[in-house]
Image (spheres, rainbow, N blue to C red):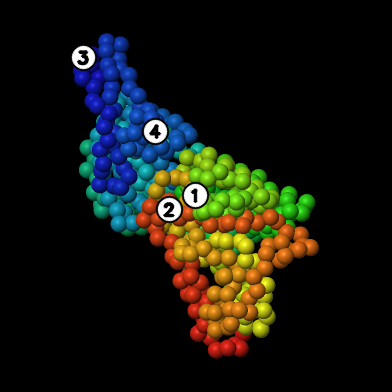
Amino acid sequence: MNAGQTPRKLALRETAIPGLRIVDLPVHGDNRGWFKENWQREKMVALGLPDFGPVQNNISFNAMRGTTRGIHAEPWDKYVSVAAGRIFGAWVDLREGDSFGTVVTAELDPSTAVFVPRGVGNAYQTLEDGTAYVYLVNEHWSAEAQAAYTFVNLADETAGIAWPIPLEHTERSVRDLGHPRLGEVTPMRPRRTLVLGADGQLGRALQSEMPDADFAGRSRIDLRDPATLDAVRWSDYDTVINAAAYTAVDAAETPEGRAECWAVNVTGLAELVALTARHRLTLVHVSSDYVFDGMKSGPYAETDPVAPLGVYGQTKAAGESLVGLLADHYIVRTSWVVGDGDNFVSTMAKLAECGVDPSVVDDQVGRLTFAADLAAAIRYLLGARPARGIYQVTGSGAPSSWADIARSVFALLGHDPARVTGVSTEYYFGGKQAAPRPRNSLLSLDRISATGFAPRDAADSLADYLEPLIAAPAGTGQEG
C-alpha cells in the first residue's frame, strides 16, 4: 500500500459456501512500507468470525508466479491471508450436505483474508513472484490428522474453476495432479456429538433422541481412567454430553464409595473439562437436585446458592463449578430420573403386581423427570443454543412425594392406591446406611421455559411410561 492511500475498513463478506467468509483488512502504509492487524481476536469475533482458537501459524513462500496448490479440505478451521504478493484463491465445499461442490473464488492481496471452515477445500494460484501465503489453523498437524484430509483435483470439470493462468502452464505437485474428481470424493463428515454414560437411563434415552451421535459406555470411556479420555480423537467432535456419573448416593457415604464418587464426579470430570476447553467443544453436563439442602420452601432457581448435604451432592456441586469455567457449556440440573431399566416406578409396578403393600417416603417432595423428556430437552438446547449456563429440567405440573407417585403407579395399573403407606424419611432409613436427602427437590423451570421449551407434565409422562403395563393382561409378568 502506498503512503497517503486510505486503508479499507475492517469488514466481513459472506459467500456462497456456508461459513466461508472474506475479510477486508485495513492496511496502513507510509514511506517505510505498510502494517496490518492480520488476526485481531477481539475485533474479528465482534465482526462475526468464530473464536476459532488458532494454535499454529504457517507460511508458504512461493518463488514463482503460477505456483498452484490444492485442493485440500482439512479437519480443522483455517484463516488464510497474504503477507506479500497476490493470489487467486479457490474454495470448494467438500462437506456432507446440500452445499457440497459449491465453488467460491476471490483474489487476495495483503488487504484481504479468508476464513475457511473445516471440510472446505482450499487452493490458490500465485499471481506474482515472491508471494508469501500465511495461514492460521486451530489444530496441530499430525500424520493421523492428515489421513482425514479430503481432496479434489484442481482441474475438476464439475468445479470448473477459471484459473487465471492455465494449469498446464503452472507449477503443481505430483500429489496434487493425482487427486480425484468431485464425483469420486467422499464428503467430509461433520463433527459429531459424543455421549458419555451411554449405558445409563439417560444415555439410552439419548440414543433414541440423537441416533447420529457417538455413544460411549464405561467400557470405552471411564472417567476414572484418564487413558480412556486420552485415547479419544477429539477433533471428530464439536459437542460432548456427559451423562456419566457415580450415582450410588448411599454407597458414596462409605470410605470406598466416597473415594470413587470424587474420582468420577470431580477428578475425572476435571480432566474432561480440560479436554473440552483445549479442543473448543461444547460440554453438556448433567447435574442433580442434590446440590441443594432442600430447606427452601419453594422451587429452587438456577441462581440459588448450592448447599449439598452429602458426598454425592458435594461432588455434583463441585462438578458444576468446574463446568461453569468453560466458555461454551450447558449444565442441565434435574431430579428423580426415570428411564429404561430398574427405577422407582418400575419397582412400584412390580410390587403392585406381586401383591406387596409398600411403605414409601412421604416427606420428600419433587417432580419426576423421565429420561426421554430430559434427552429431548438436551437436544433442544443444542439446537436452539440459548445463553450458556445452568438450565433446570424436570417434569412439570404439581409437586409430589415419593408416596404420592407410588399411589399413582398403583392406581394407573388398576390397583388400590391405599395399599401404599406413607412414612417419614427417618422411619424408612432407620438403622440403614443412607445419605442425607433434600426434603424439597422442586426445581424451577422458568429459565428453560423462557427459551421456548415446554417440559411435559410429569403425570402425563408417567401414564405414557406405564402404558405397556396398563395394556398388558394381569399376571403376564411384563415389566416397566
Report the Cα–Cα distance between label 4 and label 3: 28 Å
Q: Residue 202: percent from the left, percent from the top?
A: 54, 62
Report the Cα–Cα distance between label 2 and label 1: 8 Å
User: Amino acid type of disc 1?
Assistant: Ala
Quadrant (top left, top right, bottom left, bottom right) of the C terminus: bottom right
User: Amino acid type of disc 2?
Assistant: Asp
Q: Quadrant of residue 428?
A: bottom right
Report the Cα–Cα distance between label 3 and label 2: 58 Å
Kind of element beneath mark 2: helix
Where does label 3 land, which residue? 4
Residue 102 vs 424, above or below: the answer is: above
Where does label 1 land, which residue? 301
User: Amino acid type of disc 4?
Assistant: Tyr
Kind of element beneath mark 1: loop
Mark 1 or 3, which is nearer the eye? 1
Q: Nearer the viewer, residue 254 or 133?
A: 254
User: Amino acid type of disc 3?
Assistant: Gly
| Circle nearer the N terminus (3, 2) | 3
Mark 4 or 3, which is nearer the eye? 3
Quadrant (top left, top right, bottom left, bottom right) of the N terminus: top left
Q: Nearer the viewer, residue 324 or 166?
A: 324
Kind of element beneath mark 4: strand
Q: Residue 294: percent from the left, percent from the top?
A: 60, 53
Which numbered tag is attached to residue 446?
2
Kind of element beneath mark 3: loop
Q: Are marks 1 and 4 in contact (CB under 8 Å)?
A: no
| Circle nearer the N terminus (1, 4) | 4
| Circle nearer the N terminus (4, 2) | 4
